[in-house]
Amino acid sequence: MKSDLFAAQHMAQPASVPGMSLQNSKSIKYVVNGEMFARQGAMVAYRGSLQFERKGQGIGGMLKRAVTGEGLPLMAVRGQGEAWFAQQAANCFIVDVEPGDALTINGRNVLCFDPTLSYEIKTVKGAGITGGGLFNSVFTGQGKLGVICEGEPIVIPVSPQAPVFVDTDAVVGWNAQLHTSLHRSQSIGSMVRGGSGEAVQLKLEGEGYVIVRPSEAPATQPKAH
């Protein structure tokens, strides 16, 4: 049988070393040798001896309640084998988190991560109790984090001289050292009259970067296994 479908770039290669790697731009491969964590419903294939267990509460004190504003239901993957993860053909990226790093990611953009990473749900400071993306996942420690983004991400540097304002439905994440607050770009009168549809943004100040996706549409909830 002959087809471009069977070209080398599409073929899953034999496992080499444990851990996370990009299968392609739309999926992440994880060679499991013990345990790892992923969002529920994100596994698209696996081989080997693996078990998948839903997680709602903490595991060994590492995980806080695994539900954000957009929902981040997690599962533990245990055993020996290989698993592939994807979410609605979104673009996949691997972030190497190093000691001293603190990265906050919107729950809808978390795909999978190493068990060596510490994970905590935190309220976005200054964001009050309304709006989107106000509960984010903060990752620290050392290990790899698989992130998804609908479309090509935009990474915007933030400096003390140039704060950045982002739509709460478009933000993917930022380095946690940044100061956050809500910014109202319309007057109350303008909002009553209809306004521009861009009434409130998340303001980020300090030194670092913020990642946004080229879409303001609410992310689709993941399917459950």
Image (spheres, rainbow, N blue to C red):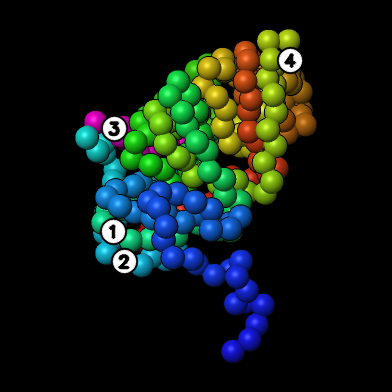
The residue beneath circle 1 is 80
Work out whether 221 lies above or below 119.
Answer: below
In the rendered structure, the answer to whether residue 58 lies left or right of residue 207 reads: left
Quadrant that contains the C terminus: bottom left
| Mark nearer the N terminus (2 vs 3) | 2
* Distance from Cα at disc 2 to Cα at disc 1: 6 Å
* Distance from Cα at disc 2 to Cα at disc 3: 27 Å
* Distance from Cα at disc 3 to Cα at disc 4: 35 Å
The residue beneath circle 4 is 162
Please state the extent of the stretch shown in magenta in the rendering. 61-69
Crowding near the residue tagged with mark 2, few <14, some 14–19, many ≥20 C-alpha atoms within 10 Å: few
Disc 1 versus disc 4: nearer the observer = 1
Quarter of the image where one finds residue 184: top right
Q: Of residues 215 and 110, which is closer to you in this image?
A: 110
Among all residues in the image, which is located at the extreme bottom? 1
Work out whether 49 lies above or below 194.
Answer: below
Q: Which residue is drawn at 63% across and 86% down?
A: 2
Q: Which residue is drawn at 27% across and 50% down?
A: 34
| Mark nearer the N terminus (3 vs 4) | 3
Place of residue 150 in the rendered image (x, y in percent of width and height, measured from the top left): 63, 49
The residue beneath circle 3 is 62
**Is there CB contact under 8 Å for labels 2 and 1?**
yes
Quadrant that contains the N terminus: bottom right
Q: Of residues 21 and 93, which is closer to you in this image?
A: 21
* Distance from Cα at disc 3 to Cα at disc 1: 22 Å
**Quick check: can you spot residue 129?**
no
Where disc 3 sits, the SS reads loop
Q: Is residue 216 magenta?
A: no
Where disc 1 sits, the SS reads strand
The residue beneath circle 2 is 48
Q: What residue type is labelled 3?
A: Met
Q: Residue at x 69, y 24 (%)?
A: 157
